[in-house]
Amino acid sequence: MKKYLMLSLILLAGCSKSELPATRNVKAVVQNTRVGKTSVPGDVVGKVVVGYQGWFSIPGDGANEAIWWHWTGGNTPPKVGDMVKSWPDIREYTTLFATNLPNQGSGQPTKLFSSYTPQTVDTHFRWMQENGIEVAALQRFQDYRQIRNVIAENVKTAAEAHNVKFYIMYDISGWGTFQDEIKTDWTEKMAKFTSSKAYAMQNGKPVVCIWGLGFASRDQTPDAELDVVNWFKSKGCYVIGGVPHEWRDYITPGTKNFEPVFKALNMISPWMVGAIGDSQTSDFYYNNYNLPDMAYCKANNIDYQACVLPGDLSARHRVHGDFMWHQFYNMTRLGAQGLYISMFDEYNEANQIAKTAENESMQPAGVGLLALDEDGVKCSSDYYLRLTNDGTKMFKGLTPLTLLRPTEPVKGGGQMHLPPYNQKIKLIGWNNLWVGGENGTAPMYCNVPHGDAWETFTVINAGNGKVALQSMGKYVSSEDGNGPLTCNRTGIGEWEQFDYVVNADASISLRGNNGKYISAEDGTNPMTCNRITVGPWERFMVN
């Protein structure tokens, strides 16, 4: 009888064999995430923080501004080619505003929310509470100060109501007069929020983040930045610096040496948006940036807040959560003092974890936006909130460190498992025929009416989360995608390794190191490894 195995795609590129076990001592993880000579667990050390933009406004929302703030590239209503890059799930908002876009795929009118509306912010912070998100960093820029003042009040009220902490995160990019104005803004407008029970505290001090420090290509000088950092510290604040991912490149003495700025910070938070877009690049930055970052911070008594991204949905970065989970794994094993999720509600840049349209039925039809099912895997609108919840648990040591994503794209979709390492399996194609290894003497076909010795493959752990398939003592080779599949290799090389991918119907697919999938070629031609997407002939049942 066929036993269909539910398995998960595991992207483990760049991990050494010593890192392959799926779990690690939980106590050790807790200790690693708390390391810091100057800090103890608080509202940012040992916590996962989400960046909260809160920057959406619409004419008629009460802000007295005729703008579609961050819903379009200008002040006009959204239209194709000039609109947000990803669409929110709007079902839980009670106050919505009509657009002139086509109806949703479901036929319902297309509407949007405004952050100026208290119910919008309350909904967002309720989602945070429901998904174990404990802290939000409210972004503050130099523009539209009055709208931002009201939204800050909305955040305070919602954070207090839902037991979520928040802190102010100033963004000084493009803010040429920040040195004086940021001090005035804090003194006259923002400092009052530190008296809220919901305001984040670290080491007994109110938390403030200044994002945009250390960017050598910008107009800000190290002296001006250092002055602002020291000013906030003189006011009794714990100061986080949002810096470039390559911030250590700017500590060499010269015209712009930012090292005094970095050393004055209580916590450093490098920005990774635009630097990484897949798990392999995440591994590269882990080895070449994050590890040296941690060593520098440890030597200089600075806490380290690593950045984790869900990925740009419009650029197909997400791989139904595998990209984000891989970062959770890397930054947890790094031993970072905190994590920063970019971002909670950034629909305009498609980097949001907040509830998002699951498919075209929930967004304007025919305008070219990608929904959460863009790669063929159905995901519930709250999937990235749930993924953040599970990542937080792993980071805090409440669950074991694991490369296997535990979060199901849709609740109740089936338990995730590791590939059946060291087990013997048979692969059945869509034509209900078996894949044959041809005893290594000829190209492979999916045309055998029964499963026997030549159709039996042992699943070998090839390292880095990959599998190899062995039959009759030899290994299946993708032949780099340029020739028919064979089973004639005596060792495991680059073209004998595959990603083991689970599909929504419980079938599996095998992806070679060329990034393409094995195809049964309808059973009448030799099998290949040259498909860029998974169709019927790229799916196999496991017997």
Image (cartoon, rainbow, N blue to C red):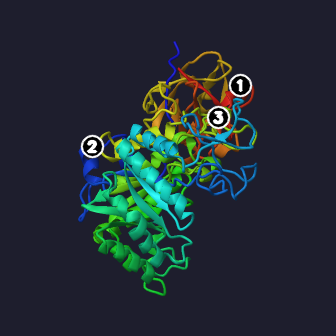
- Does residue 104 sit above or below 83 in this rendering? above
Identify residue type, mark 3. Met
Tell which circle, 2 or 3, labels the residue nearer the N-terminal end. Answer: 2
**Percent coordinates x, y for residue 300 in the rendering:** 29, 72
Q: Which residue is mark 1?
A: 523
Task: Give, as a three-letter code, the residue at label 1.
Answer: Gly
Q: Secondary structure at mark 2?
A: helix
Q: Residue at x 33, y 60 (%)?
A: 194
> In the depicted view, which residue is nearer to us: 483 or 183?
183
Q: Secondary structure at mark 3?
A: helix
The residue where tag 2 is placed is 26
Q: Earlier in the sequence, mark 1 or mark 2?
A: 2
Against 442, is 264 above or below?
Answer: below
In screen coordinates, is 532 left or right of 312?
A: right
Q: Residue furthest top?
A: 1
Asked if residue 403 shows in the view, the reply is no
> Residue type at mark 2?
Val
User: Which mark is nearer the camera, 2 or 3?
Assistant: 3
